Image: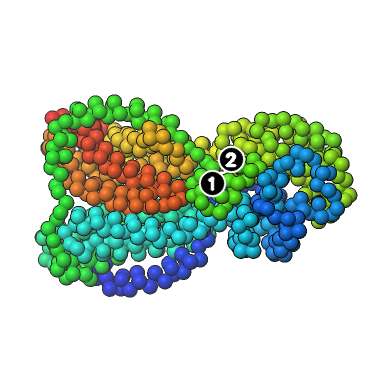
Amino acid sequence: MKKIGELVCKYRTVILIIAILLLIPSIIGIKMTKINYDILVYLPEDIETIQGEKILSNEFNMGAYSVIVLDNMTTKDILQLENEIKKLDNVAMAISTADVLGTGIPIEMLPDELKDKIYKDGSTLMFTTFKEGILDEETLKTIETLRNITDERCKISGMSAVVLDTRDISNEEIAIYVVIAVALCIIVLQIALDSYAVPFILLLNIGIAILYNMGSNILLGETSYITKAISSVLQLGVTTDFAIFLYHSYMSKRKTSENKEEAMSLAISETLVSVVGSSLTTIAGFLALCSMNLTLGRDIGIVMAKGVFLGVISVITILPAMILQFDKLIEKTKHKEIMPKFRKIRKFSIKHYKLTIITFVIILPIAFYGYKNTGIYYNLDKSLPDTLPSISANSELKEKFNMVSTEILMLDKDLSDEKVNEMLNKIENVKGIEWTLGLSKISDRGVPKEIIPNDILEKVQNDKYQLVIINSNYEMATDELNGQINELNKIISEYDENAILAGEGPLMKDLVEISDHDFNSVNTVSIGIIFIIMIIVLKSISLPVILICVIEFAIFINMGIPFYTYTILPFIASIVIGTIQLGATIDYAILITTKYITNRKYGKNKYEAVDEALGNSISSIIVSGLCFFGATFGVGAYSKIEMIGSLCTLMSRGAIISMITVILALPAFLLLCDNLVCKTTMGMRKIENK
């Protein structure tokens, strides 16, 4: 280890040059990494709804679709607009009632229930499909073009429009996230450290590691907008304490070393031993997200695990080189430490440990009940501001036309009109179904298929399938809609076992079911992995149980608060926050525990061992917790995207709760379970219980 430190000190100039040069490919990588703004794309490829989307895209050129709400437009204006839309390369079909009426068929010939659904208070609808998929760049460009060629009388709905608005608002905010996080971290570090220059040096080093991490994402092909938004601030919050540890170690070694190079060499060696052990649990926590069936977890997990690893490498190579390079500046900007020693908290924690245990036992069931019953929503529209054009269009569809969730049914083409209509009649009797529409239904109402233009017929049937549109007035991703979809599938299977019900509603149903499974599995995996690592690191059976119980208690409180404040969380936050909080804050507990073990082995009694361990750790834990809080709190308060805002709010609050819990509850449990710990920890069995 010391050899590594000596090499870093010897070649510090070379290291800084290489670090700067590596920023070039990193920035290029950032620019070239594709960002995904639709969570539904992370559903498993083999589920039926995803297969249905592929059929719609490959066989019907229906990669994506949008319902355009047209307010107070004449048939002539609608046809003119429709012709303009059809000229766009990515548009596969644009169809409205004007197409049928334009052929000379009076509106009275349309079925009353259909006429009432597509004309409401001067508004009508145009159904538009796109050749490329929901997330394809061409589709997003087409939505932008549609907005440019239309006026305020046209409102464009659909998932692609939502994705476009999500992209725009995310890109506007992401730079501000970093500025807020850095500003709050600088405030914390100025209070915690003894030099005005050091916080900027530490954050510059972390910033370099963040750029490396973001640039290397090009190796993954693409990342989600959620990952892009939170990875920088999360990496900043998680790895700041590594940098602080190196700096404190260096300043300590300066007092006993002959020169700064020797001091830094020893500091690197000491930091490497400590940081590698603690970073393993953090990395393991993030990698546990890869066990999710919803591959968004893998996206976040890999990026963050990679970020922590790069943070460690940066702390033991680039940061030492920077500190040595700016040593004179650091010395010139020295000031008295403002951070208190927290002696009263330390004294209270030891003296009243029994009271802490009693409080823990009282709060636990309350926190756990809230944790298990916190409300969760899956409708992605709810995470965005109501003022966005896509959300406004979706709202008008819902309010005027009761078009809340629209599904597309793919039936066998050879299924007779009689059977199809019989099936559709049953479907329309299902509670919550507004209407259904297919060629069989139109012809059954006296409009022969022969007079419908061929270009329209080709869009709704081919040699394999005929398409039917089903409209529901239930909100997407709700229990009502998911139950309704189950009922629809039962009816459909009676007529065509190979039929596929596709669309956003069925996709969201799969998202709900997969996410519910992931919520349980990812927490179990993260606890299991971290438990095994701690057994190896602490060489104990009992200590990993105690530490995980303490952090899980903090997670229960954090996740239980929304239940008691009547706050509903976006589903992603509920799935990943437990794993992130466990992986990111278990280090606080490990820091106290390792010092406690060392003190007990040196012959100190349990009170002295815990008191000294807490005294040597409390400042580091508070600084680390406050940095994590600072890096995420501002983003949570500022972000207009609730998916990101809620996640950052939970992380910032979780950092503080974990910090307080570790400082108060962990010492109490170490004192209470000292005898058990000594008997179940390697090298401590001969220690007397005193």
Q: In this rendering, would 223 be left or right of 188?
A: right
Question: Quick one: quadrant of the C terminus?
Answer: top left
Element class at badge 1: helix
In the image, which disc is placed on residue 381?
A: 1
Residue shown at 57%/33% (left/top)? 479
Q: Nearer the viewer, residue 634 or 195?
A: 634
Q: Which of disc 2 and disc 1 is earlier in sequence? A: 1
| Residue 535, image x, y percentages | 32, 39
In the displayed structure, 498 sits above or below 215; it is above
In the image, which disc is placed on residue 476?
A: 2
Q: In this rendering, would 453 be left or right of 410?
A: right
Residue shown at 68%/44% (left/top)? 120
- Residue contact at pointers 1 and 2, CB within 8 angstroms: yes
Q: Residues within 10 Å of mark 1 (few under 14, many from 20)?
A: some
Q: Nearer the viewer, residue 389 or 315?
A: 389
In the image, which disc is placed on residue 247?
A: none
Element class at badge 2: loop
